[in-house]
Amino acid sequence: MTFEQLEIFISAASQPTFFDAAEALHMTQPTLSKQVMRLEQELEVKLFDRSRRSATLTEAGKCFLPEARKLLKQYRQSLQVLEPFLPDHTLRIGTLPILTQYHLTEGFRDFSREHPDIQVILEEVEEAALADGFARGYYDMIIAREQMAEADFPFETKACVLAQDELTAVLPASHPLSEQPKVALSQLAEGPFILMNPYTSVHQLCICLFRENGLSPRILRTARAESIISAVEIGEGISLLPKSNLKVFRQLSSVAVPLNPPVYLPVMLISKKGRNGNAARTFWEVFFRSRRV
């Protein structure tokens, strides 16, 4: 049994389907299924009931899940204990799964070529895990949306803008407001809305915007960005998405309309102020020297 298998099992148990779990872990579904089966073979017990359309945890799986989470947590805590003894050429960076849509992967590649002596460990996780890992010192730096830079961490932080984005209304092409140059949030109040999944910062931002504007719109459901765009195109509802998502996922029968007033979504590199080693300082200075704030 490996810690990678534990992470895969936890993801498979936490996501609606194996496909969703594979996407979250950036692997193919067959690879994920194979690792789960290997874990079941080693434990000699079925963790998932595959007799239905979506696999569900067996009673054994339900009992094993909290133990798997404990084991993985202890493993990560053990690695953290060893951090002070590692040579100062390792940099652990946590990021939301947004590198591709903001064209940031090329920057990491170029940095590694320029500084082959510095090992950059890059982990893509969702908001809660990102904030927790940064607060505990597991991550030296994080890449997140602006709200994270304003969070209350147990240390001072510094931040720089890596990319700019903007929240837009995503409407079916046939929607009465689809040809407007801009649209106010109040004009969209009737919805119904299909928002990004609750664990995302974009979802949380949308909920805050509704509250600030005194709106209580009907939220039909939540989903991934590509699923939302497809649902909007067939007229199932409307949405609020970062403009960059619409560049990544092709849309044929939907339009993006800017909000009035605009809601900006800067992507930030966030670091501990004055508490990083040479590797982190080099990364900050070289990789983002032209974007520092």
Image (tube, grey):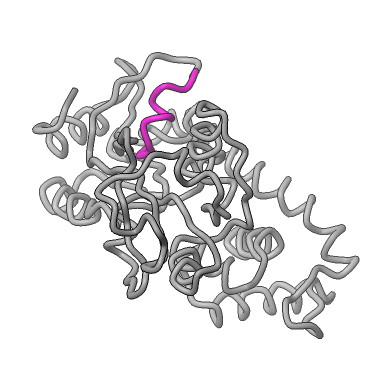
Can I make out residue 1 in this image? no
Left or right position of 169 against 236: left
Q: Nearer the viewer, residue 252 or 65?
A: 252
Q: Residue at x 23, y 51 (%)?
A: 104
Left or right position of 95 against 14: left
Q: Nearer the viewer, residue 216 or 17?
A: 216
For the C terminus, which image quadrant? top left
Is 207 placed above or below 105 here? Answer: above
Is 39 placed above or below 165 here? Answer: below
Q: Which residues are magenta?
A: 142-153
Say how many tags the image has.
Answer: 0
Is 207 placed above or below 274 here? Answer: below
Residue 276 is situated, as x and y percent measured from the top left of the image, at: 31, 23
Name which quarter of the figure residue 65 lies in.
Answer: bottom right
Is 257 placed above or below 129 here? Answer: below
- State yes or no: residue 149 in magenta: yes
Residue 183 is situated, as x and y percent measured from the top left of the image, at: 35, 44
Q: Nearer the viewer, residue 122 or 258?
A: 258
Q: Residue at x 47, y 54 (%)?
A: 239
For the N terminus, which image quadrant? bottom right
